[in-house]
Image: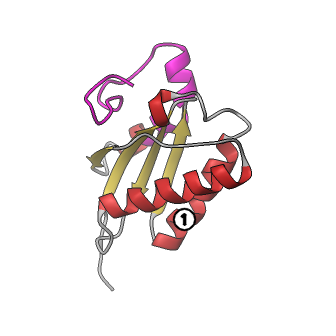
């Protein structure tokens, strides 16, 4: 068995930054992402969101490219949301940051408290940039 520890902080947004990740919709997105991650062999350390974007801290096995992992996660969640809820779409692109073990607890805590960070303007700019290098 191979040993691997490939940690990532992933971020992506709803289409046109629409506030689609509401309190009633987010639990379904979380369930779908968790199920798809498990299916892919991806370990989810933390998941957090605001109404217009999502943060995910994961361990991705080396047999799976980061881009393919994101394609699968975004595709499964948008498909499920469109089937079970109102129309839903993710924005193209994503942010992907590699992590080391030393910073992992900090990032996990940050991701789990997304709503509070955004509500109080207590953003850590190391973790709040999107694919266009604009502030989330």
In the drawing, does residue 31 fall left or right of residue 45?
right
Q: Residue at x 52, y 13 (%)?
A: 120
Q: Horizontal and vertical percent for residue 127?
A: 34, 32
Let me know if residue 111 is in the magenta part. Answer: yes
Can residue 60 be seen?
Answer: yes
Q: Horizontal and vertical percent for residue 54?
A: 49, 39
Majority SS type along the magenta span: loop
Q: Horizontal and vertical percent for residue 71?
A: 40, 58
Whether 3 is drawn above or below 101: the answer is: below
* Magenta range: 108-136
Quarter of the image for residue 20 reads top right
Quarter placement of the N terminus: bottom left
Q: Residue at x 32, y 24 (%)?
A: 125
Q: Helix or strand or loop: what does disc 1 sit on?
A: helix
Along the line of sight, the residue nearer the viewer: 85 or 13: 85
Q: Which residue is drawn at 30% across and 46% down?
A: 96
Can residue 59 be seen?
Answer: no
In the drawing, does residue 124 fall left or right of residue 89?
left
Q: Residues within 10 Å of mark 1 (few under 14, many from 20)?
A: some
Quarter of the image for residue 61 reads bottom left
Q: Give the residue at the far bottom of this rendering.
A: 1
Whether 27 is drawn above or below 118: the answer is: below
Residue that carries the numbered disc 1 in the rendered image: 36
Q: Horizontal and vertical percent for residue 2?
A: 29, 81
Q: Give the residue at the far front of this rendering.
A: 87
Q: Which residue is drawn at 53% across and 72% down?
A: 39
Number of on-image labels = 1
Let me know if residue 113 is in the magenta part. Answer: yes
Along the line of sight, the residue nearer the viewer: 13 or 109: 13
In the drawing, does residue 86 fall left or right of residue 89?
right
């Amino acid at each position: 068995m191979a040993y691997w520890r490939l940690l990532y902080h992933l971020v992506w947004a709803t289409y046109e930054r629409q506030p689609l990740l509401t309190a009633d919709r987010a639990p379904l997105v979380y369930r779908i992402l968790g199920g798809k991650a498990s299916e892919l062999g991806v370990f989810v350390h933390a998941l957090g969101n605001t109404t217009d974007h999502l943060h995910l801290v994961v361990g991705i096995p080396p047999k799976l490219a980061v881009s393919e992992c994101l394609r699968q996660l975004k595709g499964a969640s948008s498909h499920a949301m469109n089937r079970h809820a109102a129309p839903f779409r993710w924005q193209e692109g994503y942010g992907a940051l590699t992590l080391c073990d030393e910073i992992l607890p900090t990032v996990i805590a940050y991701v789990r408290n997304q709503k509070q960070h955004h509500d109080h303007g207590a953003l850590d700019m190391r973790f709040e940039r999107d694919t266009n290098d604009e502030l989330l």
